[in-house]
Image: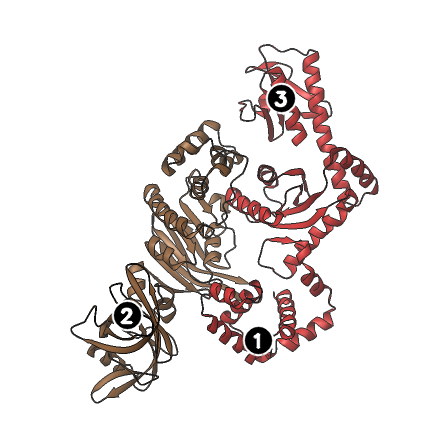
Amino acid sequence: MESMKAVLQEIGRTMDKKVFVVAQEKVFAYPSDAEISISLTELQENLGKNYKGYNIYSLSSEYPDTYVCLEGESFCRDTIANLVLIMLARALQEHKSLHQLVKGVLKGNIEDEQRFMLEEKKRKLLPAYLIMIDTLGKYSEEVLEITSNYIDIKLQLINEDHVILLSGDGAIEDLCKDIRTNIMTELLTDCSIAIGGILQHSAELGIYYNRCLETMALKRRFKLPENVYHYEKMDFYRIAADINPELKESILQKVFSKKFEEALDHEMVTTIEEYFKNNLNLTDAAARLFVHRNTLLYRLEKIYRHSGYDLKNFSDCWLFQLAWVIRKEKAI
Amino acid sequence: MAKVILKGIKKIYPGNVYAVKDFNMEIEDKEFIVLVGPSGCGKTTTLRMVAGLEEISEGELYIGDRLVNDVSAKDRDIAMVFQNYALYPHMSVYDNMAFGLQLRKMPKNLIDQKVKEAAKILEIEHLLDRKPKALSGGQRQRVALGRAIVREPKVFLMDEPLSNLDAKLRVQMRTEITKLHKKLESTFIYVTHDQVEAMTMGSRIVIMKDGDIQQIDTPQNVYENPENLFVAEFIGSPQINILHGTVVKNHDKIELQLDDDTPINITEEMQKILEQRGYLGKKVYVGIRPEHLHERDIQPLHHDFSTIYGKIEVAELMGAEKYFHMMISGKQIIARVDSKSVKKAGDDIELNYHWNKVYLFDFETEKRII
């Protein structure tokens, strides 16, 4: 809604009056910290009148439930008021148009793809990272508020149960982790975030959106522990997902024998997870596990004795890790 | 009242993986509880279950008198502070603290009141107009705490909030958070992997490992009376010295014989307990804290003590004390002695210890015997 806010600012500054746009639950204000003490019901009842120091207008016939409140002493519908309403209606139309276009592209509508290409050239939205935030459909509007105040947003919208945004910021993974922290702090709800990659051309929008969906699906499928994932780093899981079921089963049986499964306790599981999470670095993994490096070596030795796979050896380790994620995929 | 009761709380993931096995605890109103343990021990999962960010697989959670298992996080009257506090870069400190309340559509005058009250408690009133980039690390951390304080929650939940700070700032902020707890008179549940934070901040600490509670106690008791080997090794810096010994009878005396036949003596009472519990001939872990090894020339003991001998491999001057690293019975041990000591690397040293300062742990169960 950046264009709406920008137009509102322009109008408010030029006229040196407070202006509010009330669209159902959402209120846009100039100045931005101004508060309006008129309820929706009161707006409906006082349409076309001056009420509590504001002239109440309906934005346009296209948006009958959207009200504009312009500071004033008595109601009038003069040229200036009409111009204000036209400008605000256009801003809202533009915002909704772009959102509708993007949603159409995401649904695979070819006509919308063409129009989005033209629109993007005009607005210079790209290059930008395409990001998807999944809060299971909860608090989407609040998430938009959080993201727009934290990173540089070129475009953001709610599509089905996700928040989709285009951001021009760098260090995007760290920023996404921060966004997640803010969502948890402010809304006390967790979320998953998928980064589709840097969108260079508008024609790639649908592709990168599908990348985000794929990333989310892989996270769920393999029960991955983190909450922010970059599509570019998901190749291992994409390969694991694509292996045919017979081969998967064979790999699983090979690595996770009955003997090994029986021996696999919480300590071994934590050791394996931490060892992989720390990229096979013995020192870092030992520190996180709060054990001596030698203790970690002893534990890896124990895993080797029970499984036959030496995780310090690359050719053993890669197959073990593949079997490990297949095992997690199967777990119910 | 903000008592928090966890009854049989479990978190079970697909594949029958128990992240938290059976967590039972009553947290009194206004207590400062610290959950501490290594990565994967279940401390953050427990905190997230209290917050409502994670579903409870089994068990009951009460906040105040209310069963909150099915109550959404936003209705539990809690606030959270995380490791990366992520302040909004383009907003002032005031707006950073107000933002969450604005999202909840609180009236402006009430927001103003709460933000100013929180700022006063945190002593950051003079910073309200500044942006985050103009703040120091400690000030930013205080703003992050302010975002939680304005909610006026019954319980504050903190997930390793100091982990991203440098060592000096961490020490400073530890004190700040402890002072804040006293000012706010609220219940704090704090998660850390750092045993120093746990020991210095908590009124009680919960040591966890592999989803299990190892011990719940005051910092002093956990240090002086660890219930098992893991707790003894986890708490204390430098770490407790652990040697392997066998319980043997030497004439009429029961003593511990280390792997290189060095004898470790214990009190008569400890000898009786070992004999009664059938430990004769059995292997045990022998623990002695570094500060309980006294250099004979500097700090001689006068009764109920014995001596062990070693050669110093590394001598570290820490300022008020020295750490001597040496091998005894094939194990690396550390003695913490007065800085007056003139010993250095390569020197032989005689170390005395009181018999009653020896900890013994069962070799199989790792539980403390004495």
Asked where in the image residue B334 lies, by quadrant, the reply is bottom left
Q: How many marks?
A: 3
Residue type at the position of mark 1: Glu
Q: Which chain is brown?
A: B
Give the secondary structure at mark 1: helix
Q: Which residue is mark 2?
A: B343
Disc 2 versus disc 3: distance between alpha carbons? Answer: 89 Å
Secondary-structure class at tag 2: loop
Colouring rule applied to residues: by chain
Visible in this render: residue A55? yes
Res B77 visible: no
Above or below — where is A307 with respect to B4? below
| Residue B61 falls left or right of residue B255 | right
Q: Give the distance between the C-alpha atoms of the residues marked 1 and 3, in whole angstroms.
A: 67 Å
The picture places residue A41, in percent across and down from the top left corner, at 59, 24
User: Counting residues from the N terminus, which is met first, the one under dot 1 or under dot 3?
Assistant: 3
Work out whether A208 lies above or below B118.
below
Q: Are marks 2 and 3 in contact (CB under 8 Å)?
A: no
- Residue placed at 55% from the left, 44% from the top? A183
Which residue is labeled 1 in the image? A261
For the residue marked with disc 2, what is the amino acid? Lys
Mark 2 chain: B
Chain at numbered mark 1: A
Residue assigned mark 3: A44
Name the residue nearer the viewer: A67 or B122.
Answer: B122
- On screen, B61 above or below A81? below
Residue A126 rendering spot, x and y as whole percentages? 72, 40
